[in-house]
Amino acid sequence: MQVTELLAEGLKREYRVVLPAAELDAKANARLNDLKDKVRLNGFRPGKVPVAHLKRMYGKSVLAEVIDQAVNEANTKIVEDNGFKLAMQPKVELPQDEAAVNEVIEGKADLSYTVGIEVLPKIELGDFKSIALDKPVLAVSDEEVAETVNRIAEANRPYAAKPDAAAENGDRVTVSFVGSIDGEKFEGGSGEDVPVVLGSNSFIPGFEEQLVGIKEDETRTVNVTFPENYQAAHLAGKAASFEVTAKMIESPAELTIDDEFAKTLGMDSLDALKEQVKSRIAQEHNAQSRNKVKRRLLDALDGLHQFEVPPTLAEQEFQGIWDSVTSEMQAQNRTFADEGTTEEAARADYEKIAQRRVRLGLVLAEIGEKNNIQVTDDEVTRAVVERARQFPGQEQQVWEFYRKNAQALASLRAPIFEEKVVDFLLELAKVNEIPVSREELYAEDEEDKAA
C-alpha cells in the first residue's frame, strides 16, 4: 500500500492511496480458497471445487468485497498511524471512469483512490478550579405556596347550573361551535361541549367577551381575528366567524380551602397538600437555579478553550439550528425583519452559536474521557423508563423502540453524560450561592439565548 498526503489544512487531511493489484488478487485468492471448502457445486465433491473454477464464477464479486475491505483497512491504518481522532467518517472517492474501474475489478490494475479525513482537534483542558460562578438560589416562601394552592383551588372550583340566566364574567359556559373563514369551514374550527370560563382569556381574543349575556340553547355569531403570531400559520391574522350555541351555563360556587378540599385532590390534609406544593416549587426553583449556573459554567468553559472546530460538525449543528428557527418563524408567520434583524445577520449569529455548541460538546467529551466519567446501563434504563412513562398506554412500544434503536438510546445517554460532567466540574469550581428574587431567577439572561 502506498499513501501520499495531498492536503493538511487545519483539521482536514486528504490522501491518495494506491492498493497494488497483486495484493488485492492475493486476498481474493485467499477468500476463494476459503470458499472452496464451503461452496456446493454440481459435478464437484465437497471441498474439491478448483479455485480457478471458483474464480471464473465468483472472481469479480469476491474481488469487489476484497476491495471494500481493503479500503476500510487502509483508511483505518492511516488514522491509527497518525493518531487521529475522527470527527466524521472518512470520505472515499473511488475512480469514476468505468473502464478503469473494470480493470481494477478484473485484477489488471492497481486501485488508486483519495480519502478525505476530518479530525478532532487536540484539546488542552483548562484549570477548572480557577472557575468562579455565582449560583442564584431562591427559598420557597409561604406566599408562593399559598398562591399556588389558591390557583389549584380555582382550577378545581365547583360550578352550579343556573338555568334561564344570562352568562356573566366568571361563569362557565359549555358551548358547541362551528367556525368558518370567508364562508368556508376550516380544520380545527369546530368543537362540541367545550367548557369556556368567561373572562379567563383562554380563547381567541374577543371570543369570550361576545358570549357575555348568552343564555342556554341560544346561538350567537361570534366574529374574531386570529392573532398575527397564532401558532397555526394558515390561520394567523385571519378573520373568522363562529356559530356558537350555549349548552349549559354555570356559576362558580363557593370554595373553601380546607382538609376536605385537599381530600378531593387525593391528599390526606391541607397541610399535606401544602407540603407537596412546596416540594414541587422547590424542584422548579432548583432546576432553574441549576440551569443558570450551568450556563455560566459553559460560558467559563468556552472562555477557557478556544480552538478550531471540525467544519462539517459545525455545519451540521448550524443546519439543525437554522431549520428549527426558520420552521418556527414560518409557523408563526414571522420574518427576520419582525425580529429586528436580517437573514444574513441571523445566519452569522447562529453560525457562532453552532460553533460554540460543537466546541463545548468536544470539551465536555474530553473532560469525561480524561476523568473516566461514564454513563451506566442502569442510568440509561431509568431514562428509558422515564421516557416511557410520558406515553401512558404505549409504554411497551416506547421500550421496544429504544431497545432496538441504538441511535435513539444514544440520544438519552448523551444528556445524562453531560449532566455528570457538569456535576464533576461544579465540584471543582468555586460556586457562590446568591439569594435572588423570583423575578431575577426566572429572568431570561443573554446567555440563555446562546446556550
Image (cartoon, rainbow, N blue to C red):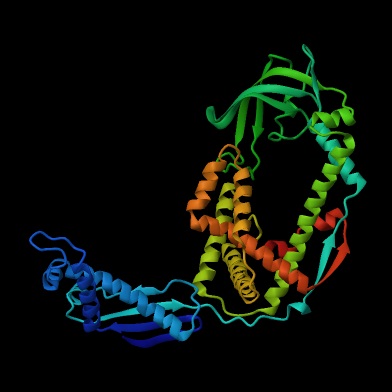
Taking the spot 65% from the left edge, 35% from the top edge, the residue there is: 225
Task: Name, please, the residue furthest toward the top.
Answer: 164
Q: Nearer the viewer, residue 98 or 59?
A: 59
Task: Name, please, the residue furthest toward the left.
Answer: 43
Taking the image as shown, residue 248 lies to the left or right of residue 147, namely left
Quarter of the image with the N terminus in it: bottom left
Residue 149, image x and y in percent?
85, 38
Taking the spot 58% from the left edge, 37% from the top edge, the residue there is: 393
Taking the image as shown, residue 295 lies to the left or right of residue 317, namely right
Q: Which of 34 and 356 is in front in this view?
A: 34
Residue 28, image x and y in percent?
22, 75
Task: Name, please, the residue furthest toward the right.
Answer: 142
Quarter of the image with the C terminus in it: bottom right
| Residue 19 drawn above or below residue 272 | below
Taking the spot 18% from the left edge, 73% from the top edge, the residue there is: 102
Q: Nearer the viewer, residue 220 or 290?
A: 290
Q: Nearer the viewer, residue 319 or 43?
A: 43
Taking the image as shown, residue 328 lies to the left or right of residue 301, namely left
Instruction: Determine which quarter of the picture holds residue 234.
Output: top right
Judge whether residue 255 can be spotted in this image.
yes
Residue 98, image x and y in percent?
20, 72
Taking the spot 19% from the left edge, 63% from the top edge, the residue there is: 39
Instruction: Determine which quarter of the picture holds residue 92.
Output: bottom left
Judge whether residue 451 can be spotted in this image.
no
Instruction: Determine which quarter of the picture holds residue 66.
Output: bottom left
